Amino acid sequence: MKSYRKELFFQVPTRRAFINITSQIETCLKESGIIEGFVLVNAMHITASVFINDDEPGLHSDYDNWLEHLAPHEPTNRYQHNLTGEDNADAHLKRQVMGREVVVAITEGHLDFGPWEQIFYGEFDGRRRKRVLVKIIGE
Amino acid sequence: MKSYRKELFFQVPTRRAFINITSQIETCLKESGIIEGFVLVNAMHITASVFINDDEPGLHSDYDNWLEHLAPHEPTNRYQHNLTGEDNADAHLKRQVMGREVVVAITEGHLDFGPWEQIFYGEFDGRRRKRVLVKIIGE
Amino acid sequence: MKSYRKELFFQVPTRRAFINITSQIETCLKESGIIEGFVLVNAMHITASVFINDDEPGLHSDYDNWLEHLAPHEPTNRYQHNLTGEDNADAHLKRQVMGREVVVAITEGHLDFGPWEQIFYGEFDGRRRKRVLVKIIGE
């Protein structure tokens, strides 16, 4: 069994953003030399997400509006977590809806994807340097 | 390390449905000959889900009502994604709540499940042919 | 490839609770002797969750309030599942938001975590004995 590990770094200038990281994961896969196995891609921070969906700007706007409806940022004092001095409790909630991680099959050296699957980094508390972990196991 | 891959196909006549696919995954596991490892089961389409829960029709009706409350299908013009000509933005949102994928342990040649765990395909934009990927790694 | 399996048991005296199980997973990892691979940690019951987030009591209170808002326990007759004699339909919904499982990378014999990542058992229908599965594969 072979294994491969890499960290990807993101510094988003806004509080929230969705970034397509599919090509970066494909580069990792090539570097790994692994042709059959699984790749795990996860946010290393608990106010961010890695998820798979469509690369369509209207949909990303819909996600942003929907998450803000489900877990509003303001008023920040509605959340007990923010009594610690943080203002990002909503980001911890939004991340649970979108998920921490994805596991993707690797087949014949490629991400084994359906026609529209793309991997995204979802940032819900940006404006600082944060990390995503890419770990591949297989042979 | 051994690996196994199969696609399952679904054509649901309605917009939404939940289908128990546990026995199909067990068949894949037997075909693979793998006795210790992980199986990844994921929707290959971004308006569908694979999840684990209870095979109880009342609960499935509750899920359907609850998801429609969280992310209503109509009015379709509430979603920017639908400006592309689609009417399935709600399906992209519902799928995030229910999840894209499950990873299940394989122990002594069986799905290593608790007493009520069953694997479901969750369709949120049906009436066309769609796929689920089953990938098993182990030995 | 090596594999390791263990069940963890929980009997929560309340209906709902969040329990930090990170140190128990680290103990499993040491017992396994695996230094590179993946660990899968999943609830074996369908009204409970395993998820990764922050070990901060205010945030846990926020999660509890938020989940109760998204999927209220009462009135119990709002859910068809409860016509079976159960009163836990809300727990099946809450568990979908928080997720069934996590997959964590193992690197150099450690859980490959960001600065604040901790693993939690999320109970939504407690007051009885329930299980979590820990399965590790790697080498």
Image (cartoon, coloured by chain):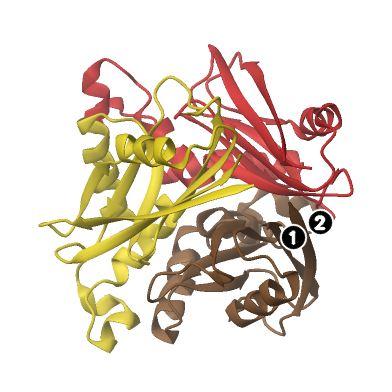
Chain colours: A brown, B yellow, C red
Residue A3 figure quarter: bottom right
Q: Please tell me which residue is depicted at 31% across the width and 34% down the height of the picture.
A: B23
Callout 1 crowding tier (Cα within 10 Å): few <14, some 14–19, many ≥20? many
Residue at the limit of the structure toward the left, as seen here? B13
Three-letter amino acid code at the position of disc 2: Gly
Identify the mark at residue C114; answer none if there is no mark. Answer: 2
- Image spot of residue C19 (x, y percent): 69, 29
Rendered view: B22 above or below A49: above
* Numbered disc 1: secondary structure: loop
Chain letter belonging to callout 2: C
Q: CA distance from mark 2 to mark 1?
A: 6 Å
Q: Please tell me which residue is depicted at 41% across the width and 35% down the height of the picture.
A: B30
Is A92 or B39 nearer to us in this picture?
B39
Callout 2 crowding tier (Cα within 10 Å): few <14, some 14–19, many ≥20? some
Rendered view: C77 above or below B93: above
Q: Are marks 2 and 1 on the same chain?
A: no
Tag 1 residue: A45
Q: Please tell me which residue is depicted at 72% across the width and 54% down the height of the picture.
A: A82
> Disc 2, disc 1: CB below 8 Å?
yes
Q: Please tell me which residue is depicted at 20% across the width and 65% down the height of the picture.
A: B129
Q: Is B13 situated left or right of B64 in this image?
A: left
Check the picture and name the quadrant holding the C terminus of chain B.
Answer: top right
Chain letter belonging to callout 1: A
Would you say residue A74 is visible in this rendering? no
**Labels in figure, total:** 2
